[in-house]
Image (spheres, helix red, strand yellow):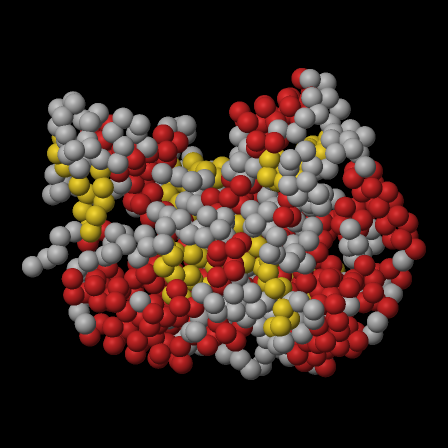
Amino acid sequence: MSEKMRSIFEKYERSPDQLIPILQEVQREYGYVSPESVKMISRYLRVTENQIYGVSSFYAQFRFTPPGRHSIKVCLGTACHVRGGATLLEMLERELDIKCGQTTADRRFDLDRVACLGCCALSPVVQIDKEISSRMTVTKLSELLKKYE
Amino acid sequence: MNKLKKKITLAKGKWEELQDNKDPVIYVGAASCGRAAGALELVDEIERYISENKVNARVIQVGCIGPCYLEPLVDIKMPGQPRISYSNVNTKVLGHILKSHLLEGQPFARASIGNFSRETFMDIPPLFEHPMLKPQVRIVLRNCGIIDPEEIDHYLATDGYQGFMNALKMTPEDVIGAVRQAGLRGRGGAGFPTFKKWTVCRNSPGEQKYLICNADEGDPGAFMNRSLIESDPHAVLEGMLIAGYAIGASKGIVYIRAEYPLAIERLKKAIAQMKEYGLLGNNILGSRFSFDIKIKEGAGAFVCGEETALIASIEGKRGMPRSRPPFPAISGLFGCPTIINNVETLGTLPNILRNGAEWYTRFGKEGNRGTKTFSLVGKIRRSGLIEVQLGTTLREIIFDIGGGVQKNFKAIQTGGPSGGCLSEEFLDLPVDYESLASAGSIMGSGGLIVMDEDTCVVDVAKYFLDFTQKESCGKCIPCRVGTKHMVEILERITHGEGNPEDLMTLRNLGDTIKKGALCGLGQTAPNPVLTTLRYFRNEYLEHIKDGRCRAVVCKDLIEYRVIKEKCTGCQSCVRVCPTGAISGPRSEPHNLDPTKCIKCRSCYEICRFDAIAGDAIVIRTAEKRS
């Protein structure tokens, strides 16, 4: 077992209710939940792999493929929707030539939607990595993308 | 207890020093919303400026005071002057403000929105006389944007933890009695009397009881809880202590969305401070009450805001609701009696225990006591976080506090995706649990989304239902299959392919789902569709019969046009068009080929903001189909 995984396990009790916090930490550490890590978690918590996939696929947070270099999250909360969030997502899908939930072939961007970032008064907003950009337009967004390699 | 009293005396001294400051203090509103507007760059800029000019000033990051449309907000308090608030600050304006106010002691009146005293100071009016703030009654939000959320001393100095100390002097039954007398109802949406839930849990047998703070604020368009936790985390944690004491719990859990990293960070810091001050652990303040608080991060599932789903999620399972009874107050987390209270309910408790139940009943009205926070967003002039007495009318909220709508008012959605869309005739409806329910909507957790004539209600209803459909856990058939079917019908209508029978089908499906679904998510999911069908039937019919979307939103029913008289032929739109639909030589009106146009809005935006052409491209509803 890798050193990293061992140090993650050390922080959590061997109890099934620790499954989600462990998955979250694995994702924080590796960027995604790999089949190997599922096997290791299964052995550690004594929970079947099926159960782990059942739980992890239920929650929107977990991903099972390696992430791209930058993550784009388009907020599609109500306020953002009313002010044109969906148009931004469509534009990104077109410009990056991927669908929402996918990664570009050059692994430059991940494209996802998010239910609400809680910055509704500044809508529509788009989050790239940790940066939230407010009052977005199609034009501003396509300029913004150039900042990320 | 004595140890804490000493700390309080020290904290009060520190706080007074800050109010009676000898050196300038600069406050920056740096909650998530402020940060999205660029607050952190301003903090860097301010720090650079004061070190460059060798000014001995302190910079404090505070939470959100509410008027998000004015973000980012920067306040400057010079010695001997009141704290003065500046709005919509950017790095350029900041330079002027700092030079004039910080270096020359002259407030930069042009960019200021108010001062923190009760009187006008050098032509700057009192901040709390601002039309957005004046009608509000700030009880839960009393500290937001004013104190440093990462300083327990600031909270203590503003009478923090006083309510908890009062509670410790009472029996748990008396605490429940006080909450009953105050008439507090759950602020998570359903409005169930808090004392009733507590009494059941208090009387349930069991060694171990749990108190859970529900901070899984998943409603799109709602950010009250995020803002409260980011701006005043100790208020919520103090509420947890009071609730834990009342129900006899020794373990508290905050279940919070992972999408709120700043709120999580602030909670973690606040919990560490509580431990340091002896406010958590065994025999707190020398009493027999022991309590500990842990944080559990949600993993992105809206349904986990439902009590039993939330419990399943903490237990490490799929977050699916189960049928009740048994209610969590009797058998909840790990089978133990569990109380789940919303962030705002908990944030209200310290105020009730500090000022007395009788004091709280002065706010609101019979059966709906106290205040409620709302996030006021959408097509409104002054958007942000507000707190008003229950019973305030929608008109007062939208027009007095919110400053009205940019264009003509069309509708307001209360209660997020579970709520209803109310038309103009409901503007004088008092906002209380029963009145909203009678109109077919709900209070919900407090998202208020205002729509104007540019918002298509059919599109909004589809949006909400699409959201709940995607978030449905899939356990019960009415919700899983019913909502899907409804979305498909709405999809057809917005594409202009609906037929008149669809409206009847939608209503029948909606009624069935409301009656048959297992949990609150499904039972309320049809509300947006049912209310819009009731109050905006004509718009549905226009989509179906005329293929017309009067708000010019539904893509299949609109078209883009170039107004030849206005077009200067500047070629800006030609450059941005991704499909080459616009053509034309320079300096001559351009042509827009509707067969190539994908309605991506690029040309519209560039034309609107371009000083040369301006407004030459319009979006309008398509010609009536034959």
Q: Nearer the viewer, residue B626 or B564?
A: B564
Q: Is residue B388 visible?
A: yes
Answer with the quarter of the image where residue B168 lies.
bottom right
**Residue B567: x percent and y percent?**
19, 31
The correct choice, above or below, for B610 with respect to A49 in the image is: above
The correct choice, above or below, for B209 with respect to B385 in the image is: below
Task: Pick out the residue farthest to the right.
Answer: B2
Residue under the point 19% across and 54% down: B557
Number of residue marks: 0
Task: Pick out the residue farthest to the left.
Answer: B626
**Residue B259: x percent and y percent?**
52, 50
The correct choice, above or below, for B469 with respect to B556 in the image is: below
Q: Nearer the viewer, residue B502 or B615?
A: B615
**Residue B593: x percent and y percent?**
12, 39
Residue under the point 56% across and 47% down: B67
Residue under the point 51% across and 39% down: B36
The correct choice, above or below, for B203 with respect to B622 in the image is: below
Residue under the point 70% across and 79% down: B199
Quadrant including the C terminus of chain B: bottom left
Q: Is residue B189 visible?
A: no
Quadrant including the N terminus of chain B: bottom right
Q: Viewed as shown, does residue B59 lie left or right of A19?
A: right
**Residue B482: x percent and y percent?**
32, 73
Q: Viewed as shown, does residue A32 lie left or right of B78?
A: left
Q: Viewed as shown, does residue A51 lie left or right of B207?
A: left
